[in-house]
Image: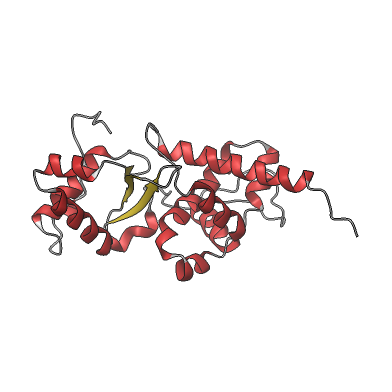
Amino acid sequence: MKLTRPFAMVEKDVLFSPELTALEKLVYCVLCAFSDNNTRSCYPSYNTIAEKVGCSKKTAIQCVASLCEKGWMQKMEQRTKKGGHRSNLYFLVLSPEKQYLYPAHAKPESPSPPEKSDSSSDGESYFGYAERLEDVKNRIEYDYFAEHMPDQLYMVDFLCQCIPELYDTSFPEDRKLLNQVSSLDIIGFLHHTAGQNYSGVKNMKAYLKTMFLEYLRNEQLLVATAVPPKI
């Protein structure tokens, strides 16, 4: 993974946090230097992290584990098709108290006026971003993931925020699919993307949004072409 920017932005919450050691802050800074601006994700290897920080690989592993445990980042293990290890995928957050904002998204200060769009399957229209996000979380039973799949919650949050964005830029047929997304669709997509190799992906957010929409289309096609069992 290459560094393409001459600088890196790090939140003051991290630099001024009394619970983080100097090495943990430095590891976080290195990850910020590699991270994507939109998704705040990156995938440098432990060797790369250690090299940039100037510490041992063991220390880099310990710092990453501590940052995850303290809630400053999320880690997703990646594997090859044969089950081998790849560099982890990291998602950075502003602070443990602000994880619900991940990935960073500029919310409007006040709700937007109602949009003229196709009605949803239940007859309701989308309004401002906050209301739309809440609607999505209710439809997918967000509390279930928070209770039973906390290790995947960062990805669920990501998908919840992507659905309203996809709705704004999709064709009517795709909007119908987005209006019908359920917890089963989210679980299915999580299994579908498990072990994916993201090396070479320049815009992680756009890539995953495209993958999610394609997944919904394929699932609809499978249902439409399924042969009913003979009785």
Residue at point 38%, 55% (across, down):
101
Nearest the viewer among 22 and 97 is: 22
Image x and y of residue 98, in percent: 32, 59
Residue 69 horizontal side relative to residue 147, left or right: left
Up the image or down, 13 lies above or below 83; here it is: below
Residue 179 horizontal side relative to residue 132, left or right: right
- Residue sticking out furthest to the right: 231
Nearest the viewer among 117 and 93 is: 93
Residue at point 12%, 44% (across, down):
53
Image x and y of residue 144, in percent: 52, 68
In the rendered view of the protein, which quadrant contains the N terminus? Answer: top left
Q: How is the image coloured?
A: secondary structure
- Residue sticking out furthest to the front: 82
Image x and y of residue 17, in percent: 15, 60
Q: Is residue 13 visible from the viewing direction of this image? A: no
Nearest the viewer among 209 and 165 is: 209
Nearest the viewer among 28 and 60 is: 60
In the rendered view of the protein, which quadrant contains the C terminus? Answer: bottom right
Residue at point 63%, 48% (across, down):
178
The tally of labels here is: 0
Up the image or down, 78 lies above or below 8; here it is: below
Up the image or down, 105 lies above or below 72; here it is: above
Q: Is residue 198 visible from the viewing direction of this image? A: yes
- Residue sticking out furthest to the bottom: 147
